[in-house]
Image (cartoon, rainbow, N blue to C red):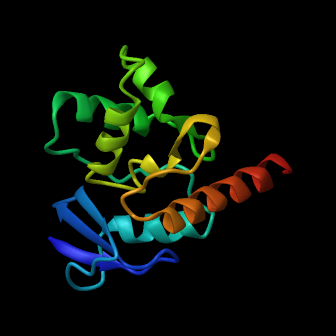
Amino acid sequence: MRMHVESPIGPLGIETEGEVVVGVRFGSSLGPPATHPVAAELADYFAGKLLTFTVPVELRGGSDFERAVWGEIAKIPYGEMRTYGSIATALGDPGAARAVGTACNHNPIPVLVPCHRVVGAGGKMVGFGGGLDRKRRLLELEARVALEQSWG
């Protein structure tokens, strides 16, 4: 089913099959407003109340390498970042930072599979399928919430 969710970073087109989220697209209203549980989880995420999505996702398509990158991205904790190079190294190919960037750009379920948490060397904000402004806003949200939680 195709639907959309309004968010602070613009509309998100959501594609589901039953309970499973199979796609998220920035700036897209794929259909009617979402009634799927992902809508409530996204609302809580953007309100700073949800740190881990629990709706089931299924990453479809992509090469073996892309699926491996998406798997590594999914492991990045809320409020933390990894570099393209560190993901390449984790996958056993330290020279594949650019390929990691390409795989991030092909991530079919951004936000839920948090490719926005992947940055360039030295923390430089580079590349993002949803645009750097969205990436910055997502990282700022997570940093603020993580800081607030650490203060108790």
Give the residue at x 40% y 53%.
Answer: 112
Most extreme residue toward the bottom, as rendered? 32
64 shown above or below 128: above
**Of 88 and 138, the residue lying toward us:** 88
x and y, in percent, of residue 18 in the image = 16, 60
Apparent side of residue 114 relative to residue 15 in the rendered image (left or right) = right
56 shown above or below 68: below
Give the residue at x 80% y 46%.
Answer: 150
Apparent side of residue 66 relative to residue 73 in the rendered image (left or right) = left
Apparent side of residue 135 relative to residue 140 in the rendered image (left or right) = left
x and y, in percent, of residue 126 in the image = 50, 50
x and y, in percent, of residue 122 in the image = 64, 36
Apparent side of residue 86 relative to residue 3 in the rendered image (left or right) = right
**Of 132 and 144, the residue lying toward us:** 132
Count of numbered labels shown in the rendering: 0
Query: In which image quadrant can residue 12 be found?
Result: bottom left
39 shown above or below 74: below
**Of 149 and 131, the residue lying toward us:** 131
Q: Quadrant of the N terminus?
A: bottom left
Give the residue at x 51% y 60%.
Answer: 135
Give the residue at x 65% y 60%.
Answer: 140
x and y, in percent, of residue 39 in the image = 38, 71
28 shown above or below 97: below
Most extreme residue toward the top, as rendered? 92
